[in-house]
Image (cartoon, helix red, strand yellow):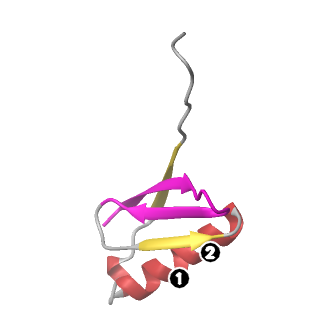
Amino acid sequence: MKEIIFILEEDLEGGYNARALSASIFVQGESIAELKNNIRDAIKCHFEHEEDLPKVIRLHQVTEDVFSYA
């Protein structure tokens, strides 16, 4: 696997959530830096062999804007 993509969202209660699109990995963190470290740890636990680890981790941040039509 060359890369793995995570969808990153702000948690309503604070912090951040990230879930992988191509693997069953979900992580949380209080800051972006903590989230990135948790993602690395989760990837290391998820893939059994060193050669299966992705070389690139992509974070796609999702934001939501709500506004009135009128």
Q: Is residue 1 left or right of residue 10?
A: left
Indicate which disc residue 33 carries: none
Residue at 71% over, 64% down: 31
Quadrant in the picture for residue 19:
bottom left
Q: Quadrant of residue 50?
A: bottom left
Amino acid, disc 1: Asp
Task: Please state the total of marks drawn on the protein image.
Answer: 2
Q: At which x and y percent is residue 1?
A: 30, 67
Q: Which residue is mark 2?
A: 37
Instruction: Report crowding for label 1: few under 14, some 14 to 19, many 20 or more residues within 10 A (C-alpha).
Output: few
Image position, residue 62 (x, y; %):
50, 44
Q: Tell me the SS state at disc 1.
A: helix
Callout 2: helix, strand or loop?
A: helix
Q: Which residues are magenta?
A: 1-21
* Residue picked out by circle 1: 41
Magenta stretch: includes residue 53: no
Residue at the far front: name it.
Answer: 70
- Asked whether 69 or 10 is in front, the reply is 69
Nearer to me, 21 or 64: 64
- Magenta: main secondary structure equals strand
Q: Left or right: where does residue 61 sit relative to residue 24?
A: right
Q: Residues within 10 Å of mark 2 (few under 14, many from 20)?
A: some
Q: Estimate the x, y position of residue 28 in percent, counting from the top left.
A: 56, 71
Q: Residue at x 47, y 80 (%)?
A: 42
Q: Are marks 2 and 1 in contact (CB under 8 Å)?
A: yes
Q: What amino acid is labelled 2 in the image?
A: Asn
Residue at (70% x, 66% y) in the render: 33
